[in-house]
Image (cartoon, rainbow, N blue to C red):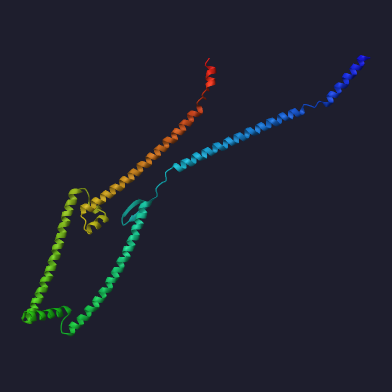
Amino acid sequence: MEEINEQATETTIEAAWNEETPEPVAEEDNDHTEEAASEADTADQQEQAEDETGKDDADEEETEVEDKPEETDQFTLKHLDEVKTVSRDEVVTLAQKGMDYDRLRSKSEERYAALEVEKSKADERLAIFNDIAKQSGFRDVDELAENTLAQQLAEREGIDTAAALKQVRLDRREKELAAKEQGLQSAKDAKSKVDADARAFVEKYPNVDFKTIPKDVWDKVNNGDSLVGAYGDYITAKNQKELTAEVDRLKAELEAAKKNAENKARSTGSSQTSGKPKAMSEIEAAWYSD
């Protein structure tokens, strides 16, 4: 009887235990949830790493663009039969010279207009004096002036008016001849100067053709400079300009070579680092040393 009671008690306890014990389904759901959260964290980390890598690449590209030297603007100009290429600074300088030329030309035109007005007034006065001379029986104002001077000389020297007139005309002729002779001498001196300057130029620049001498040089010669000096200044300025251009070119090449070397060094360093095994720590070295 007692055995039957014990068996019934055990059966009752087992049934109660089965009713209160939850099924293991919830544990499986928790495992899936934790796995999904872990995968989401991994995806976020990968996305963040890709964003940082893209940002680094963009920064590097931006740095390379900023380090790239700007190209100097070049302009082709044609003056008369000469074509040459100039930089932006030279264009600005030429434009400034053009503005100065326009200003000087405007002043020159104003002075020329004023001279034209004065010439017109002088012509009017000369016409009036010619009319007066003709009304007095003379050919023109020059003949009137000669006779007037002859009368004054005759009264001053006490000589005949006809003789005084011959003397006045002779004096006038001598002055005209002296002025003409002086002009011829000046032209002769100028020619001698030009010849001497040309000989000096040929001695100093035997391989230079006169036809190749720029107009700027001749302008200086016309203003009083020697041909040798004006051409020497031209050559000095030209050499200085070419030297400056060569220095700028070499600087640009050196800067480009330096930039290429830096880029190559960075590229080589990255490739070596990517394939190189990771160095062991001190603890790992001590562990594997035995």
Q: In this view, does 18 lie above or below 240?
A: above
Q: In which quarter of the image is residue 140?
A: bottom left
Residue 81 horizontal side relative to residue 257, left or right: left
Residue 147 locus on image (x, y percent): 12, 80
| 163 to the left or right of 34 | left
Q: How far from the left and from the top, in percent, is residue 2?
A: 92, 14
Quarter of the N terminus within the rendering: top right
The percent coordinates of residue 245 (x first, y second) are 33, 46
Q: Residue extending furthest left?
A: 159
> In front: 75, or 53?
53
Q: Is residue 201 above or below residue 56?
A: below
Q: Residue furthest right?
A: 1
Q: Residue visible at 67% across and 33% down? A: 37
Asked where in the image residue 19 lies, by quadrant, the reply is top right
- State the residue in front, 77 or 183: 183
Q: Relative to 227, does residue 276 appear above or below in the rendering?
A: above
- Residue at 28%, 49% (x, y): give it: 238
Instruction: Report the side of 7 relative to 157 (left or right).
Output: right
Question: Residue 184 placed where, x, y %?
Answer: 14, 64
Which residue shows up at 31% across the image and 46% down it?
Answer: 242
Task: Judge from the rendering whether residue 118 lies leftward or rightward of residue 47; answer left or right.
Answer: left
